[in-house]
């Protein structure tokens, strides 16, 4: 039972507003800093209202980059991050759902063993296998390529496990009805399993897109060509500029721009994301 008392409602809203301010205030400061010239930031006093250099600073960051830090234009780095994040998210989902479908609906020797081998890879952190993976990628000539950025991160034991658990909840009557209608394995997957997995796919896509967008260590290892830099790498290089002060107004503008695609994905897929986490459509 939920009590509807004005004082409880007031306290709830105050706590909610304080939480929103705690989260949003640093982002607001970053946005404000991105609208001033760099001379206005080195004094150590940051105003709370935006300045008049919004278009100049964001235009410089998008098309010019920070040459002193060896950073290419932000527009190019955002495109690289977008390609990498989409390839990782779509690839992980495709491989995981097919793997889970085979494990649940096909009978073959050592089926359970295959699943547990996949599951055990969850216990191997990326840092443990990153050097052998780098050697394989280098031997295949995939350094400084989009395939080198995405393919080594494209398998996901977590997603395979989640799809397997979801498929186990699908009633057997649906499989029997599909067989009666003459549907084969491919048609059952396409017409029944895939539509039922729509919300799960959407929830996983949001999580995996953000995972791919925020990758830092792997792109740092496999890319030395500026044309393949990702946005997270670019921000780090802008901060660690040698023999000069960092251009904080451009760094803040880049940080704000880097937030836009993940936020857009979360907002656009919010309804499916929530349903995929808390509900099933069977």
Image (cartoon, grey):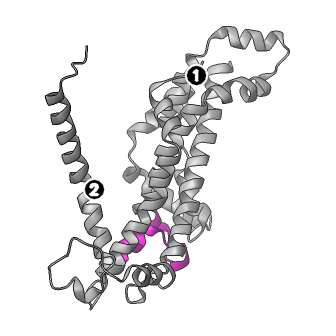
Q: Secondary structure at mark 1?
A: loop
Q: Quadrant of the C terminus?
A: top right
Name the residue at 49% across, 61% down.
134
At 25% across and 49% down in the image, what residue appears? 20
Distance in Å between CA atoms under marks 2 and 1: 35 Å
Residue at image coords 28%, 83%: 246
**Which of 228 and 34 lies nearest the eye of the viewer?**
34
Residue 208: horizontal and vertical position, in percent? 49, 46
Q: Residue furthest right?
A: 182
Give, as a single range, the part of the protein colored magenta: 218-237
The disc, 2 or 1, on the residue closer to the chain's N-terminal end is 2
The quadrant in which residue 175 appears is top right
Q: Identify the main secondary structure in magenta.
A: helix
Which type of secondary structure does the marked residue at label 2 adopt? helix
Which label is found at residue 281? 1
Quarter residue 238 falls in: bottom left
- Of residues 229 and 74, the one drawn nearer to the viewer in this rendering: 74
Left or right of residue 226, residue 141 in this image = right
| Residue toward you, 214 or 15 | 15
Q: Label 2 neighbourhood size at 10 Å, few (<14), some (14-19), many (20+)? A: few
Question: Residue 109, can we see it?
Answer: no
In the current view of this chain or complex, which residue is farthest to the front?
6
For disc 2, the marked residue is 24
Does residue 61 appear to the left or right of 138 in the view shown? left
């Amino acid at each position: 039972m939920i009590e509807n008392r004005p004082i409880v409602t007031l306290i709830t809203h105050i706590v909610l507003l304080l939480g929103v301010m705690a989260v949003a205030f640093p982002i607001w400061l970053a946005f404000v800093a991105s609208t001033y010239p760099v001379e206005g930031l080195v004094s150590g006093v940051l105003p709370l209202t935006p300045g008049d250099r919004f278009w100049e600073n964001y235009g410089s960051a998008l098309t010019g980059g920070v040459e002193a830090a060896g950073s290419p234009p932000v527009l190019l780095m955002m495109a690289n991050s977008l390609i990498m994040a989409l390839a990782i998210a779509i690839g992980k989902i495709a491989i995981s759902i097919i793997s889970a479908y085979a494990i649940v609906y096909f009978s073959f020797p050592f089926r359970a063993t295959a699943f547990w081998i996949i599951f055990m890879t969850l216990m191997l952190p990326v840092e443990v296998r990153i050097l052998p993976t780098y050697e394989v990628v280098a031997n295949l000539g995939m350094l400084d390529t989009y395939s080198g950025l995405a393919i080594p991160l494209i398998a996901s034991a977590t997603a395979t496990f989640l799809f397997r658990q979801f498929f186990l909840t699908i009633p057997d009557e649906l499989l029997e009805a599909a067989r009666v209608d003459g549907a084969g394995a491919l048609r059952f997957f396409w017409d029944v399993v895939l539509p039922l997995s729509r919300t799960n796919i959407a929830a996983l896509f949001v999580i995996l897109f953000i995972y791919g967008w925020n990758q830092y260590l792997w792109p740092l290892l496999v890319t030395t060509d500026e044309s393949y830099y990702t946005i997270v790498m670019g921000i780090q290089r802008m901060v660690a500029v040698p023999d000069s002060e960092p251009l904080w107004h451009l760094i803040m503008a880049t940080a704000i721009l880097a937030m836009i695609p993940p936020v857009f994905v979360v907002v656009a897929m919010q309804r499916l994301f929530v349903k995929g986490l808390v509900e099933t459509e069977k």
